[in-house]
Amino acid sequence: MTANNQVDRGTYDPLDMNSYSLNRIPKRPLSPAGRFFRLWGLPIAALIFVVSAYLVQFPILDQRQQIMFGLFATALFLWISEAVPNYLTSMLLICGLVLTGILKAKPAMATLGDPVIWLNVSAFIMASAMVKTDLVKRVALWLIIRFGRNAGMIFMTFLAINLILAAFINATAAKAALMMPLFMVVSAIYGAPGTDTTNNFARNLVLHNLLMINASCNMYMTGSGANLMAVALLAGAGTTIYYFDWFAAGVPLVLAFGIISYMIGVRFVFPLTKEDREPKLQGGREALIKAYQALGSLKVSEVKAAAIFLLVLIVWATDKLHGLNSTIVAMLGAVIMLAPQLKLISWNDVDIPWHLMIFSAGAYSLGAGLTNTKLMEVLTKHLMDAFGMNSMSYFELYAVLTAIFIASHFIFQSKNMRTIIFIPIVIGIAQAMNISVLALGLPVALCINVCWSLPFNAKPNAMLYGTNKYTMSESFWYGFVMSVLYWLLLLAAGGTYFIWLGISPGFF
């Protein structure tokens, strides 16, 4: 079955949620480039490591940083080229970190027990319960029938959901877990059922939602923990940012980004034909209505699943009031859903993509290695020195700092790490240049959640990559285009309404 084939609808029900197993790795036909890298990728990776870690000497790096740079470059090549499956790259990376002495064996392997992994496992258990009870199918069909009279309205509906959820949930993995089953059903209705098939509609749907799961966090000061970290760092420099200040700056930017990125995606990046925009189920909209009616009235099991998940969401949304750990809350929700007394779901019904968990563990080990060697701090400092920022105008500083911060997400997989490294640098530059810290600090802070290009850049990226609706190279290309768009919109904001809000003094 090719990546764009449509399954035989005489023998396959695209609305059967049991067909959407994320634990099973589908087989994809190899492109000419894929066949080349499958044959020569490992020798090339070995050459990259030897050259970058030992043969080419970088004066600014010590020996451990040089080796870490080699491991990072090699892992990045293997992840993007897909010479071997991504989980094997992660396993090789962990072995490399230990064998080269960058990390001890225990901390390198302990990442599989990271709270984020447990959060993902618990989220997948809860998602499985909502699938098993038909709750996801009911919600997806209702949304499409009620709002999805055309493909554009479906995208706008998901955009609105993302913007609303971001106000209450700052855990992007939780938002991804909530919405991922909906993507699968909607993708099936538009011709990409299961995890073995995809098309441009499915690519655009999942990737645009990945954008907005992350970008919507930029609307609210409480949208992510890294946002609050930036606010605290700026406050330490004597600059107070209030909730409404952030909201007023973020809303127009994110809303414009959501709409324009959708238009660019479906017209230029992964173009949708007229046929792509039509439901592929036989009977079209009428078939959807019949399928919705066939579900009957709301079942007790659906009510139970919805109540538990909504309770988890409420506790997540109010974490600042009670301080309960989001991972523990998710685990408790998963335990309740699996409890035999509730008769909601059994372990045999649970769909957990363990290959994705191993991939994520490797990405977190990479982050531990980067932190341990302080490689990124050194590279960032020298990169900024190379730009000669001491002689730049406000506009040049604004453009360069936001561009560097956005570009940094291609190599960092931690928003907190990026924030801790970059925000103090931005504060120092603003103070040295006698520029308002707010004028540089807030625009850079509005880039914190630009982390959507590669699966290891953020937790929801890894989760949605498991839907198999796009390749890593497609994710990189889509993310690169949208990162440039976000930067251009941020420049436009700095020259217009940021001035009206008193954030920017103006570029000229």
Image: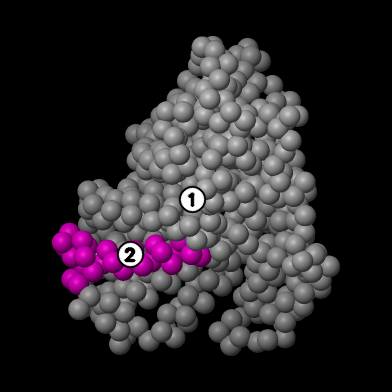
Residue 159 located left or right of residue 249: right
Residue 145 image offset from top left, x and y in percent: 46, 28
Q: Which segment did they paint magenta?
A: 480-506
Residue 68 image offset from top left, x and y in percent: 65, 71
Residue 145 located left or right of residue 73: left
What residue sits right under mark 1 in the picture? 208
Identify which residue, 70 or 480, lies in the foreground. 480
Residue, x 29% and y 51% (percent of image)?
251
The image shows residue 434, relative to residue 329, as above or below, that is: below
Going from N to C along the chain, the mark reached first, 2 or 1, is 1
Q: Is residue 71 visible?
A: no
Q: Is residue 445 magenta?
A: no
Location of residue 159 by image quarter = top left
What residue sits right under mark 2 in the picture? 490
The image shows residue 112, relative to residue 249, as above or below, that is: above
Q: The residue under label 1 is which amino acid type?
A: His
Residue, x 37% and y 34% (percent of image)?
318
